[in-house]
């Protein structure tokens, strides 16, 4: 029975761990994740879920405990830290990562946003998720399998994140047979075999992108209008700060998100205005 060290976070990490646990074909030796009291923006807690499933769990500061376990696979799903070569070389079969983007097109971070901003110029209206062998260079290992979803012209980055989460869970579920049968290296394809554009974005790649000058919003050039529209959608990822402009020293946020979703139907106090309410939404 293949043994696994699972390193991850996010609701997708929970879903993938549940899949591994539900299969009698795998032995999950250890789970490494955020601590239960760490402040994270997403719902759920992989630490708590792993405990509920009966696994041994440690936090990221103790990740090297993995080296004490004889494992066939190291599986990473939204694990935030770059792993050193000692950890990558430790599994008997392979270290694997479920990367929430199409490889080799999008390596690195903030790829939901950049994919929306690039879609129009590249005429590339799809977004991927990739299971790949991990290498010392970030997101550069051989590709085991990919799955794609469309990028819609009305998508925000958060909408794309939610859509690809489902596709990623399906891809992971499908590829467990590949792991069980030991076929990872047989099916893995070097990234050099793929054509197309290639991008790499750091965690700081959106720094300075959120401020949009008012004059650019007022520009009547169609290509400029579309670029601004795409940027607003690309930077719309609750609970993070969206794009904004400044008017007379006041910051005005620009979002396509439906505020009724954000406030979950909370009542808005009446101000005595008798005209029909106008929703503040870009949808």
Image (spheres, helix red, strand yellow):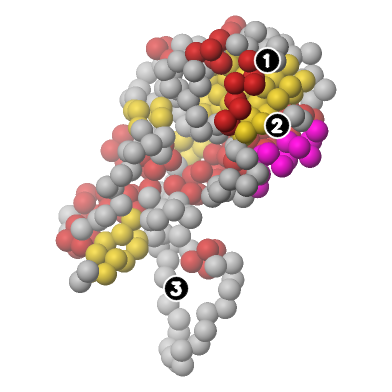
Q: Residue at x 72, y 42 (%)?
A: 48
Q: Which mark is residue 1?
A: none
- Which residue is labeled 2 in the image? 57
Q: Quadrant of residue 68?
A: top right
- Which residue is labeled 3 in the image? 279
Q: Residue at x 45, y 81 (%)?
A: 277
Q: Is residue 177 visible?
A: no
Distance CA(mark 1)–CA(mark 2): 14 Å
- Which residue is labeled 1 in the image? 68
Q: Residues within 10 Å of mark 2 (few under 14, many from 20)?
A: many
**Residue 170 x %, y %:** 64, 32
Magenta span of residues: 44-54
Q: Is residue 161 above or below residue 265?
A: above
Tag 3 near tag 2, CB within 8 Å: no
Query: Which of the two labelled residues, at mark 3 and mark 1, occupies the earlier sequence position?
Result: 1
**Residue 80 x %, y %:** 51, 33
């Amino acid at each position: 029975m293949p043994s696994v060290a699972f390193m991850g976070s996010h609701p997708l990490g929970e879903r993938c761990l549940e899949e591994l646990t539900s299969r009698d074909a795998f032995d999950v030796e250890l789970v490494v994740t955020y601590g239960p009291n760490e402040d994270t923006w997403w719902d759920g807690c992989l630490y708590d879920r792993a405990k509920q499933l009966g696994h041994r769990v440690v936090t990221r500061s103790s990740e090297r405990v993995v080296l004490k376990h004889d494992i066939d696979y190291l599986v990473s799903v939204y694990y935030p830290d770059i792993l050193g070569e000692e950890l990558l070389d430790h599994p008997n079969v392979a270290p694997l990562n479920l990367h929430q983007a199409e490889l080799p097109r999008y390596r690195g971070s903030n790829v939901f946003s950049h994919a929306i901003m690039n879609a129009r110029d590249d005429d590339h209206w799809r977004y991927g998720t990739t299971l790949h062998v991990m290498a010392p260079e970030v997101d550069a290992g051989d590709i085991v399998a990919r799955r794609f979803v469309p990028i819609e012209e009305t998508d925000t980055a958060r909408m794309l994140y939610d859509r690809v989460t489902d596709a990623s869970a399906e891809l992971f579920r499908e590829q467990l047979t590949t792991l069980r049968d030991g076929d990872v290296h047989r099916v893995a394809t070097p990234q050099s075999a793929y054509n197309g554009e290639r991008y790499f974005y750091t965690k700081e790649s959106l720094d300075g992108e959120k401020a949009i000058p008012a004059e650019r919003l007022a520009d009547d050039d169609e290509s400029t209008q579309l670029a601004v529209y795409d940027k607003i959608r690309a930077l719309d990822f609750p609970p993070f700060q969206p794009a904004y402009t400044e008017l007379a020293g006041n910051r005005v946020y620009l979002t396509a998100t439906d505020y009724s979703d954000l406030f979950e139907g909370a009542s808005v106090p009446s101000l005595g205005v008798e005209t029909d309410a106008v929703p503040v939404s870009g949808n």
